[in-house]
Image: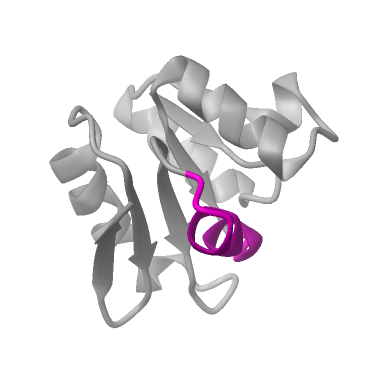
Amino acid sequence: MIIFDENVEQYWIDVINELGIEFISIREKHQGVSDLQVIEIVKSFKGLLITEDKDFGELVFAHSIGDVSIMFLRYDQPNYSQIEEYLISTLNRFLNQEISGFITITKNKIRVRKI
C-alpha cells in the first residue's frame, strides 16, 4: 500500500488513483501528525511512503530508523513529467516487495538505498 505524506502534490495522488493502486493520504486521514507518527503509520500498513520532504532521509539515516520504505521525490515543480515515468516504473518494481529502503527519484536517476 502507498501512503502519501501530506506535502505530496495532489497530482501524484491522482496518478496513483488512476492506476488503481490502493493508497492512504496523510493529508486526508491524519493531517498534522509528526514525521515520526507518519513513519509508524507506514510501518503499521507495511506500506511505501511517498514524500517530497527531505527530513525523512535524516530520520532514517541519522536516527537509524529501519523497517520502513520511503520514496523521496525531487523534481522542478510543477514539471511533473520530469519524473512521472520513473515514479511509475519504480512503483511497479518495488510496490509489492517487502524491502526496507530509501528510494530517491530525480529527473536524472533513481537511487535505491537499503535501510
Q: Position of residue 83 (x, y in %)?
A: 35, 67
Q: Quadrant of residue 93?
A: top left
Which residue is painted at 28% across and 82% down in the image? 108
Q: Quadrant of residue 58?
A: bottom right
Which residue is painted at 48% across and 25% down in the image? 43
Image quadrant in which the N terminus is located: top left
Q: Position of residue 53 (x, y in %)?
A: 63, 60
Q: Position of residue 27 (x, y in %)?
A: 73, 33
Which segment is the magenta one?
53-65
Left or right: 110 as drawn, with respect to 12? left
Q: State whether the magenta stretch is mostly helix, strand or loop.
A: helix
| Residue 7 falls within the magenta-colored stretch | no
Q: Could you say which is closer to the camera, residue 41 or residue 78?
A: 41
| Residue 62 falls within the magenta-colored stretch | yes
What coloring was used for the rendering? one colour
Left or right: 87 as drawn, with respect to 33? left
Which residue is painted at 49% across and 74% down in the image? 75
Q: Quadrant of residue 113?
A: bottom left
Left or right: 20 as drawn, with respect to 62? left
